[in-house]
């Protein structure tokens, strides 16, 4: 969980400007908390009904999430290419964005 938190915090920081970062963290953590609460309630209810139904639901959600990520990556790749983290163009565009945020 600790590694997950660090990665998501870094992603929120990279996706938002300095002035909106605290609002973005608040929105992200609120949505994350509500989803954890709702997910626990749904999974508990399904477990009470049937462990097999719970397993089927979890597998279906994981497959749907995987397909959604693939679709997003495909659409992102067509929109101008996916920049790799170690490529100079990715690094320079990130530096430019941070520079404009500081000004």
Image (cartoon, helix red, strand yellow):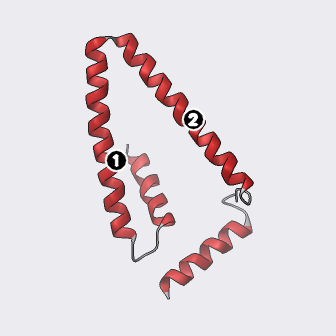
Seen from the viewer's position, the closer of residues 25 and 78 is 78
Q: CA distance from mark 2 to mark 1?
A: 19 Å
Tell whether 59 sits left or right of 82: left
Of the numbered discs in the image, which one, if any, rests on residue 32? 1
Q: Quadrant of residue 91?
A: bottom right
Can you say whether 61 is above or below 102 in the image?
A: above
Can you say whether 97 is above or below 64 in the image?
A: below
Task: Give the percent coordinates (x, y) of residue 81.
Answer: 74, 57
Seen from the viewer's position, the closer of residues 11 and 20 is 20
Query: Which residue position is annotated with label 2?
Result: 66
Q: Residues within 10 Å of mark 2 (few under 14, many from 20)?
A: few
Of the numbered discs in the image, which one, if any, rests on residue 19? none
Task: Give the percent coordinates (x, y) of residue 8.
Answer: 44, 53
Mark 2 in CB contact with mark 1 (< 8 angstroms): no
Seen from the viewer's position, the closer of residues 83 and 86 is 83
Earlier in the chain: of badge 2 and badge 1, it is 1
Tell whether 38 sits left or right of 73: left
Residue in the picture at 67% in, 53% down: 76
Count of residue discs: 2
Mark 1 residue element? helix
Image quarter of the N terminus: top left
Residue in the picture at 73% in, 69% down: 88
Residue in the picture at 32% in, 11% down: 50
Q: Residues within 10 Å of mark 1 (few under 14, many from 20)?
A: few
Mark 2 residue element? helix
């Amino acid at each position: 969980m600790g590694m997950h938190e660090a990665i998501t915090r870094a992603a929120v920081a990279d996706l938002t400007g300095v002035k909106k970062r605290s609002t973005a963290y608040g929105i992200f953590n609120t949505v994350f908390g509500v989803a954890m609460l709702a997910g626990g309630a749904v999974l508990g209810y399904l477990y009470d009904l049937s462990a097999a139904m719970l397993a089927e639901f979890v597998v279906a959600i994981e497959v749907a999430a995987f397909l959604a990520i693939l679709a997003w990556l495909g659409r992102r790749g067509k929109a101008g290419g996916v920049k790799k983290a170690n490529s100079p163009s990715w690094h320079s565009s990130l530096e430019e964005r941070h520079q404009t945020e500081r000004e």
